[in-house]
Image (spheres, coloured by chain):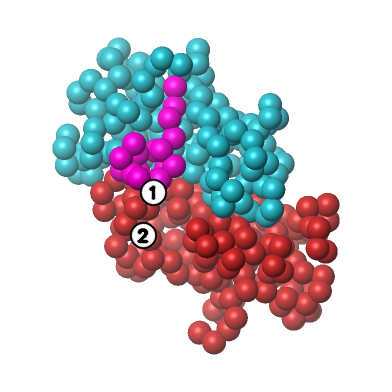
Chain colours: A red, B cyan
Amino acid sequence: MNQKPFQDYYPETFSYCYGCGRLNEHGLQIKSYWDGEETVCTFQPKPYHMAIPGYVYGGLIASLIDCHSTGTAAAAAYWAAGRPPGSDPPFRFLTGSLHVDYLRPTPIDAVLEVRARVKEIRGRKVVVTSTLSANGEICARGEVLAVQMPEHLSPDM
Amino acid sequence: MNQKPFQDYYPETFSYCYGCGRLNEHGLQIKSYWDGEETVCTFQPKPYHMAIPGYVYGGLIASLIDCHSTGTAAAAAYWAAGRPPGSDPPFRFLTGSLHVDYLRPTPIDAVLEVRARVKEIRGRKVVVTSTLSANGEICARGEVLAVQMPEHLSPDM
C-alpha cells in the first residue's frame, strides 16, 4: 500500500500511544489504512503475546481493535469534514466504550487482520465496528464508540 | 495481604498469559485477591503505557479488566464448587466477551485498582462486573463474560 497510515498524520504530542503511536518505542505501533470503504490494519503478534500456548491473549485483541477504531474515526472525520488527512486542526479520538466478542481462540502464529467500518458519525462521536481475523477466519468482533478529544487534553491544538 | 493470588494457582501451562501469567517475563503479571465479596487487583502502569501524555492507553485498561475478571471467575468457580483454590481439576476461564466504558482519562502516575464482583454463574459461564479506579475515582467500568476453557485447549487437564 502506498498510502500513509492514519497514525502517521497524528501530531507529535498524540504519537506516543502504546497501541498506535509511531514514537512509542515499547508499543505496538499499529498502522491503519483505507481499503475502499473499510479500513485495515495487520499485526503479527509476538510469541509472548500469548494467553495459553498457541493463542493470543484477549488484551492484545482489544488493544488492536481499540486503536485501529480510533484511527478509523479520525480518518473518517477528515473525510466527513472534506479536509485532507493531517490538516489543521488535527482530529484525534479517545475511546468512550469498547466491546469485543471473542468468537474463537486466535492463533498466535498468524498475521492478524483488523477490518473496520464506520457505522455512524454523530457530532463528536463516531461508532466503528470491526472484525479481527486470522488465516481468513473471523476470531473476534469489535464495536468502539470513539469520542473526539476534548480541547483541554490537547495542549498543542 | 497474606492470601496467595488467584493467578498463582493456575497450572504451569496456563501461567504464560501476557496479562496474568506469573511465568510470562514480558507480561503484566497481575495479581488478584479476594476482599470480602469483591476481588481486587492493583497495577502501577509504566510510563510507556500512555495514550496521550499523562494518561493510560485504553488497551491496558481493557487488559487489566479482562485478566482480573477471568481470574475472578476461576476463584468464584472453586468457591461455588466447594473446592479449595488450585485443587484438581483446575478451573481456567477464557473471555467470551469484554465491555469497557471509559468514563474519564486515567492518570498514568497513579496505582490503578480494579475491583470486581461476580454478577452471575450459569453453568460454565461467569459474568463479572468491575470498576477501575485511580486516586479513589472510578475511571472505567467493565463487564466480562468468562467461559470455562474447553478441554481440547487444556493439554494438561
Determine which residue is flagged by label 1. Answer: B26
**Which residue is pictured at 83% across the width and 64% down the height?**
A157
The segment highlighted magenta reads B16-33
For the residue marked with disc 2, what is the amino acid? Lys
Residue, disc 2: A46
Residue B38 is at least partly visible in this image: yes
Q: Where is residue B28 in the image (x, y as percent from the top left)?
A: 44, 42
Q: Residue at x 71, y 69 (%)?
A: A11
- Residue drawn at 74 percent across, 81 percent down: A84
> Residue A58 appears at what percent x and percent y?
42, 48
> Mark 1 and 2 residues: CB-CB less than 8 Å, in contact?
yes
Q: Nearer the viewer, residue B71 or B57?
A: B57
Image quadrant of residue A90?
A: bottom right
| Mark 2 surroundings: few (<14), some (14-19) or many (≥20) residues within 10 A | few
* C-alpha separation, residue under disc 1 versus residue under disc 2: 10 Å
The secondary structure making up most of the magenta span is loop
- Which residue is outermost to the bottom? A2
Q: Residues within 10 Å of mark 1 (few under 14, many from 20)?
A: few
Q: In this view, does A132 lie above or below B150?
A: below
Question: Considering the numbered disc 2 on the image, is that residue within a helix, a strand or a loop?
Answer: loop
Whether A55 is drawn above or below A137: the answer is: above
Would you say residue B30 sits in the magenta stretch?
Answer: yes
Residue A145 in view of the camera: no
Query: What is the number of the mark on residue A10?
Result: none
Q: Which residue is drawn at 35% across and 16% down?
A: B79
Question: Does residue B152 appear left or right of residue B106 in this picture?
Answer: left
- What is the chain letter for disc 1? B
Residue type at tag 1: His
